[in-house]
Image: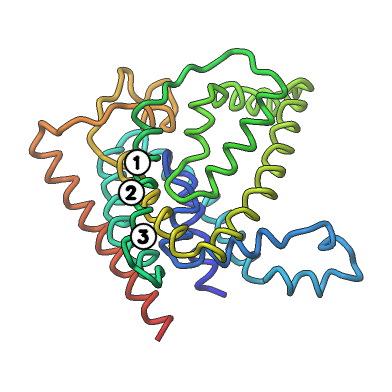
Amino acid sequence: MIRNFAKGILIGIANIIPGVSGGTFALILGIYTRLIDSLSGLSFNIFSLSKFRKEFKRIDGAFLLQVLAGGVAGIALLARLMDYLLRFHPAPTLSFFAGLILMSVSIPYNMIENKKLKNIIYILPGFLLVAAVYRFWSVEPSSHISVLMVFVSAVLGISAMVLPGLSGSFILLILGVYEPVVGHVKDFFSFPPSLSSFKILLIFGLGCLAGLSVFVRVMKYLLHKKRDKTLSFLVGLVTGSLIVLWPFKDYPPPVFADKSADIAIITARNIFPVDPGLVFFCLIFFLAGAAAGTGVKILEKAKNT
């Protein structure tokens, strides 16, 4: 129970990091397949009092609740800290998580049973997909978005969030709906709350539910029918996420005064460092992250022995 809760905390933290999905940590922590199986089993029967106990057991409900509780706790407890670190100390923060992911990616790789070239070759398209998304897709926010666009964006965004290596917030940025949606969130929670914003957020929520219900079932099928190829592709996605975690970036001025960390970190261009002091500082945090990743591997190995 405590182990699953702790893993949920890490997944929650991952969802705070721009460019990284909770699926990334779920994969490197070795619970991705189980989480997908549990989510894909959700149905309205869970709300039936007569069927609740049977349905709860069928979907591995205890595990799902433990991870979910950890995720909520991770976001609630560390959202402000992560926001501060990403705004004012982005380079060492990204370095730490880059080291953590790099050292932990061997966990899902070792889950691939048949490591023949015909399977592991799928690592390459996974990596190239993330690289292409972050390199070539432009970001053009729009002040007005249609209801259909809100729904479709929510479907694609939540699907990306499930996939390791792809950030749901970045997909929303690509589609030009990130800032309008965030604006509607602010308007709805202002006083008096905006009814038009409530409509947009309701459509967005329905899109998330639709995308999640369909996509987790697709992932379940792939993980059980094409396991090794799918895992290889997911390893490629996770490895590709290191591109956005590159700590040295050309942030547009002003960097963190009036822009969110999400937009600055995801859209800023990667550059080669010129400050030796910053390189050394980031290297220390990278090694700290690598040490944490090694600890995750040791715990995972101990669990399986």
What's under tag 1, amino acid-wise?
Leu
Up-down relation of residue 6 to residue 269 (above or below): below
Badge 2 element: helix
Q: Residue furthest right?
A: 50
Q: Are marks 3 and 2 in contact (CB under 8 Å)?
A: no
Horizontal relation, residue 304 to residue 141: left or right: left
Quadrant in the picture for the N terminus: bottom right
What's under tag 3, amino acid-wise?
Lys
| Residue underneath mark 2 | 124
Q: Which mark is residue 128?
A: 1
Q: Residue furthest front?
A: 118
Quadrant in the picture for the C terminus: bottom left
Q: Name which residue lies at 81% across and 74% down.
A: 54
Q: Are marks 2 and 1 in contact (CB under 8 Å)?
A: yes
Residue in front for this viewpoint, 64 or 217 = 217
Q: Could you tell me how far apart the alpha carbons at marks 2 and 1 are, in whole angstroms?
A: 6 Å
Q: Name which residue lies at 59% across and 21% down.
A: 180
Badge 3 element: helix
Badge 1 element: helix
Q: List x then y, in percent, for residue 198.
A: 76, 27
| Residue underneath mark 3 | 118
Return the disc, 3 or 2, that comes first in the chain's sequence. Answer: 3
Q: Are marks 1 and 3 in contact (CB under 8 Å)?
A: no
What's under tag 2, amino acid-wise?
Leu
Q: List x then y, in percent, for residue 187.
A: 67, 22
